[in-house]
Every structure is written in C-alpha cells, then in structure tokens.
Amino acid sequence: MTRPPVIAAWGAGVDSTAMIIELAERGEPIDMVLFADPGSEKNQTYAFIPLFRTWMEERGIASEIVRYQPRNFKHWPPYATIAENMLSNATLPSVVFGGGSCSQKWKVAPQEAWTAGWEPARRCWDEGGRVTKLIGYDASARDTQRYRHALVCEDPRYHYRYPLREWGWDRARCAARIAAAGLPVPPKSSCFFCGAMKPDEVMDLSIDELRVIVLMEARARPRLRNVQGLWRKPVLGCRGAIPRPGSITEFIRERGLLPPSEIDQIMDIAPDALLDFQAAQAALPVEKRTPMGDWLYDFQHAAAALRTTTRLPDDPERASARSRFSQGGPDATL
C-alpha cells in the first residue's frame, strides 16, 4: 500500500453511516471501519449494526467491532459494559458532570488499541507516516464546536479527516443520503442512558432500557450532590426548550413509560439487592465471582414479574422476594 491506510470511525449513527455510504459511492478508499461497542447502545442501534455491516461487506469494505476489556475489578463483580460499570460504582456517566471520559475509555481507546496491532498501521508508523482516520462530524453548530476542539489536538500517529464538513452536510442531509441508499435511518448513536439524550429519544427506548435507567439513578442517588439525575437539572422550557426534570426516572413516571408501581419497586428494592450481591461477591476470589451481567439479567426477569404481581408495601412476601432477588435466582421476583 503506497498511500497511508484509511480507517473510518463508525458510531452506527446517522452521520458516520452517511459518511461511509457517500465515500463508497465516490470510490474513495476505506481500508477498515471500526465500531467500538460499549455494550450499552440502544437496542435499535444493535439492530442496525449487522444490517449495515452486510451492506459494507457487499461492497468490499472491511469492518471490525472492538470493545474495551475491563481487567481490574478490585472487590467488584466482573463487569463487561459501561452500564454494568456505572451500576457497580454507583455513579452516572461523566457527561452528567460535564466530562467526557466515558467516550475516551469505551470508544476511543478500544479503537486505538486495535489499530496498534493492525499491520498496515504498524508499517505506516514504522515508515514515519500517519494513518488517515475519518470522523463523522457534520456541519451543524454542535459538531462545529467539537470539530474546533479536535483541531487543536495534534496526534503524531493520525491524520484526521472530516468528510461531512468538507461537503457541508448537516444531519438532515446525512439522513436523506442513508434513505437514498435504501437503508433505514438509524437512531442517534449513544448509550441508552446518556445524559445528552433528548426527551424524544427516551420515548423510543424499550422497557428493558427504561428499567436500567431507573435502577442506575436510584443506585447513584445517595452519592449525588449537585445533580438530580442523568439530565442534571430541570429544564423549564424557556426559549423553545422542551420542559423536562433533571431525573430521567421522573420523566419516565410523568410520561407513563413504566407503571408507577414498577418504578417504585425498582427504586425501593433493587439498589439494596445489588449491594447485597456485591457484598457476597467481594468475599470470593475474582475468578469465582458471578459477573455483573448475570445479576442484571436476573434483574430484568424480576422486574418483568412486576407486571403480573402486585404487593402492598408492608407485605411480608416482599422481604422474601428481596432475598431471592439479591441471590439472583431464576425465580426471583420483586
């Protein structure tokens, strides 16, 4: 390969998908497409990924899915996704507190680790060159801000290119390009509990995703001081903004996205049950601990039982249910 290798960073959302489609149509080279999976994308995104990977494969575009591999669990049960990480630590994503470390850890770092072992990149670097990395920032005001920030970050290993900005494409133009290719337009790419989500995105989430949001906010609540939840603070609706609370759980309750009884039961029981589970696992060698994902799987089954089971707050069966739930048994109910 006489030219530098070209990698496209694909977020499985509208912008980066349209970028790849248009580059392929123009015959521009893409040697590899990388999708970094944090394990907690929206269900609709996971449905779109295999469809578009097939589209790329049919056009000779190679793609890989890369993941961050947690290793140092200390006294925690092993976790594999960013949602499990948040629940283990009783915290919320860094974007809630004005940071961006979750993207660096779960998105950027896995792509860089994979590329470091990719032979075309290694040859390029050995020869003193830089890998071309395609980034799907569009021409919108928000992405312009991100683009300007990226410009000041020099990287000796990569030359960053922003095709959508070269073409002057905004998000609407990107969505139209995807539709013109005969593909469904994917949802905005983000974790399903991202604090940057808009209300309409929450309305489109599945019941399983909504439950985890309720659990995550309830688990983190004792440690929160300056924010109410994943949305930080309420938006009053001034200057055209859509009113919303600072807690997505409260939005879920207000809009009736989950039954109030289910929300209350999750908030009341699940955080303590998770603490019980973590305490039990902390006493075991790490190789013998039950993964956090197993507990979360059982949580979903237990929460689903709420739709057919109703108990009064002082029902003695509730204590028994909590005990079963904390042990993660297959018949656990709340």
Image: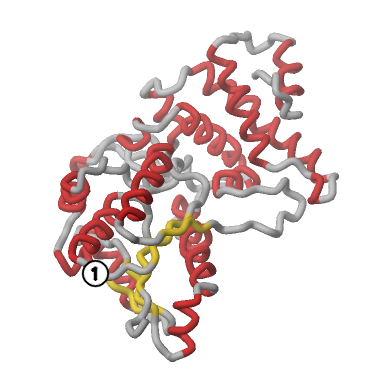
Residue located at (66% from left, 18% from top): 333
Q: Secondary structure at mark 1?
A: loop
- Determine which residue is flagged by label 1: 28
**Image quadrant in which you'd find residue 221:** top right
Outermost residue to the bottom: 128
Residue located at (68% from left, 11% from top): 314
Quadrant housing the C terminus: top right
Q: Amino acid at mark 1?
A: Glu
Instruction: Work out whether 328 lies above or below 145.
Output: above
Q: Classify 10 Å Cα crowding around label 1: few (below 14), some (14-19), many (20 and above).
A: few
Point out residue 54 in the picture as x, y percentages from the top left corner. 36, 49
- Observer able to see residue 153: no
Point out residue 125 in the picture as x, y percentages from the top left corner. 46, 85
In front of the other: 244 or 255: 255
Residue located at (49% from left, 48% from top): 226
Point out residue 197 in the picture as x, y percentages from the top left corner. 36, 43
In front of the other: 75 or 65: 65
Q: How is the image coloured?
A: secondary structure
Q: Is residue 176 left or right of residue 208?
A: left
Point out residue 204 in the picture as x, y percentages from the top left corner. 35, 32
